[in-house]
Amino acid sequence: MAEANFKPIKKTSVEKMEVKPNLDLEESYKDFDWESLYKQLDWLPGGGLNKAHEAIDRHANGDKRDKIAMIWEGKNGEREDYTFGDMQRLTNKFANILQSLGIQKGDRVFIFMDRLPELYIAFFGALKAGAVVGPLFSAFGPEPVRDRMQDSGAKVLVTQPDLRRKIAEIIPELFDLQHILIVNKDSRDPAPIDPQDLSYHEEMDKASEDFTTVVTGQYDYSIMHYTSGTTGKPKGAVHRHQAVVQQMATGRWALDLHDDDIYWCTADPGWVTGTSYGMLAPWTNGVTQLIYEGGFSASRWYEQIQKHKVTVWYTAPTAIRMLMKAGEEVPTRFDLSSLRYMCSVGEPLNPEAVVWGDDVFGMPFHDNWWQTETGAIMCANYPSMEVRPGSMGKPIPGVQLAIVDEDFNEVPDGEDGNLVVKPGWPSMFHGYWNNAEMYNSRFRKGWYITGDTARKDSDGYFWFVGRADDVINTAGHLVGPFEVESALIEHPAVAEAGVIGKPDEIAMEIVKAFVSLKDGYEESTKLRNEIMRFAREKLSTAIAPREIDFIPSLPKTRSGKIMRRLLKARELGLPEGDTSTLEDD
Ligand code: ATP
Ligand code: MG
C-alpha cells in the first residue's frame, strides 16, 4: 500500500499557539448528541433559524460588533476591512433591495461574481430576505450559467459588468429572471449600465440599514450548489438553514478555529467549500477571514499568508501540488511563521503532499472528506490526533460512516467497499433540484450512498480508494486510481498523475497513467521506463501502470479535480459527456 511508506505525524496546534484543540475526539464520541450544539446557536425570535443571523447578526448584536469579519484584498492590491457591524448594515440594505423587488421566502437569487466584498454582502442579504442563494463560479461561460439559472428558476441575478457582457446572449433565455443587479466595484468598468438593469450601488445608497430577517425555519432551504461535474452532469444540491450547526461545529473541530485566528479558505464561493467554509464556518464562530480576489500563483499565495498573518489555512490538493511544483525555495522567501494549522479537501490528498507540508511549513496538511451533498465536513484528521498521511481521518462526532458491500453489509476492517453515511446528519442536502429520482436513488437500505469507495483500518481511520466509477478491475484486482497516482507523484519528475482503466481482452482492464512533468524535466522513453519501474517497485507489478502517456496538464474541473472520465473518453475515442465545468487549458 502506498501509505505504508509514510509514518504518522503527531502535531497539534497547542505547540504553536498555546491553544487547546477544540475537540478531544475520543471523549467527544461518548454520548454525543447534536442538541447541545443546536443550543449554542442564537436562533431567531420564535424559534426560527437563519444562516445570516448566525453568521453575522449574532456577532453584530454582541461584543464582536467592531471585530473584523472580512479582510478583503483585491486583485489590484486594494484592501478593505469589514467588521461584523459593517456586514450587518450592508446585508440589511441588500435584503431591503430584494424585498422591494418583491423577493419572497424560497425565491432563488443567483450570484455570478468574482470574489468581491459585494458577493458576500449579496449572499447574506439574500439569506436575510428568506431567499435561496445560488452562487455561480465566475469563470463559467454562458452555457453553464444558462443551465443552472434555468434549472433553478432564479428570479434575480447579481453580477458585474464584464460577466454580464460575457453571458449577454443567454439572458433572453432566462424566462424566470426578473431583475439583474450590477455591481460595478470601484467603477472598474467604464461602460454605462444597461437601462434594463439595476445598479447595485445606486440601490444600496437608497436602501435602509434596518431590516428584520425574514423568519425562516431550520428546515427551510437556504443555499443551492451545483456539484463539481467530475463524474457527470452537475446536480443542484439543496441545503437547509440547519446545516449551519454542523458548519459551525466542524469549523471548530476540523479546522481548529479559535477566536484570534486569521483564517484563509482558498475555495471560491461558486463551490460548496467556498460557502460552507469560506463564509459560514468562520463567521458563525466569529473568526476574521481573509478573502483574496486574485488567482493562484505560489508567490502571491505565500505573500497573502505573510501579509495578513494567516494562522489557519484551508486549501485543496491541486493547489498544494502546484505549490510543490513551484519548488521549496519559493516559500523560504516569505515569513510564514504565523501559520499554525493547515487543511485540505476536494480530492484525495496524496501522502507525499502531507509530508511535504510537514517538511516545508513544519506542520502537515490535515485532509478532510465531504461532498456538496453532505454540506459540511464528515471525516477529518483532527488537531487532537495523529495524522496518517494519505488517510482522510475519522468521522466527526454525530456522523456515522461505514464501508459496505453491494448488499449493504459492512465489510471487515481493511477491505475496500462503498462509503455510505447514516442519513440524518444536520447539514445533509435535502434534494437535487428538479431531480427527485436521482435524489432517491442515493438512499438505500438505511444508508446514503456517497459514490466513493474507501476502507477503514483497525484504528478507525478511513482511507479513500476512488470514485466508485473510477475503480479499475485488472486481472482480478480492484485498483483505486488514487493509490497508483500517489505512488507516481513520489517520483521526482512527476507533478501530477491521472490513472484510468483501459479495456483489455485478457486482463479486463489495464492500468493506464497520464502524467505531467515538473518544470525542468523532458519527456523521453527513458524517463517513461524509469517512472514505470519506479511505480512497479512502489506498488506491485499487478497494479502498477502498464502504459504511461505524458501530457502537459491533466483535464480538471474548475474546482480543481482531475476528470478521469475525460482521460478515459479521450483515450477510447468516446463522447466526452458534460464538460460544463471543465477548466480552460
Ligand atoms: P459530481 O458529483 O458532479 O461528479 P464531485 O463529486 O467532484 O462532482 P463535489 O461534491 O464537489 O463534486 O466533490 C465531492 C467528491 O470529491 C467526493 O465524493 C470525493 O470523491 C471527492 N473528495 C472530496 N474530498 C476528498 C478527500 N479528502 N479525499 C478523497 N476524495 C475527496
Ligand atoms: Mg459527487
Image (cartoon, grey):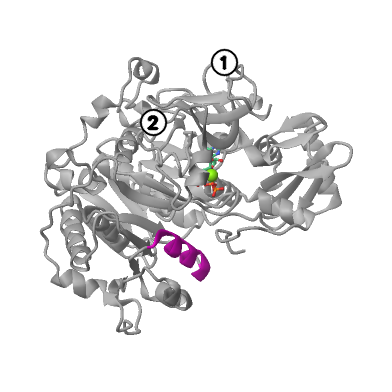
What x and y, as percent, mark residue 473? 76, 35
In this picture, is 60 found above or below 411?
below
Which residue corresponds to the image point at 26% horizontal and 26% vertical from the top-left?
35
First in residue order: circle 1 vs circle 2: 2
Per the image, the residue denoted by label 2 is: 424
- Comparing 318 with 499, the one in front is 499
Highlighted range, magenta: 141-153
**Magenta-colored stretch includes residue 147:** yes
Q: Quadrant of residue 183?
A: bottom left
Residue 210: give x, y in percent of width and height. 10, 58
Residue 154 falls left or right of residue 214: right
Q: Nearer the viewer, mark 1 or mark 2?
A: 2
How many tags in the picture?
2
Identify whether 242 is placed above or below 293.
above
Please indicate, yes or no, whether residue 175 appears anywhere in the rendered image: yes
Q: Residues within 10 Å of mark 1 (few under 14, many from 20)?
A: few
Q: Amino acid at mark 1?
A: Ser
Say what secondary structure mark 1 lies in.
Answer: loop
Residue 70, position in %: x, y? 27, 53
Residue at the extreme right: 506
**Residue 529 among those drawn in magenta:** no
Q: Mark 1 and mark 2: span between their CA atoms? A: 26 Å
Residue placed most toward the observer, 7 or 84? 84
Which residue is under mark 1?
458
Element at label 2:
loop
Give residue 538's position: percent from left, percent from top: 74, 31
Q: Which mark is residue 378?
A: none
Asked if residue 537 is positioned above or below residue 147 in the image, the reply reads: above
- SS assignment for the magenta stretch, majority: helix
In-image side of 198 versus 456 (left or right): left
Q: Which class describes the residues within 10 Å of circle 2: few (<14), some (14-19), or many (20+)?
A: few
Name the residue: 19% across, 41% down: 48
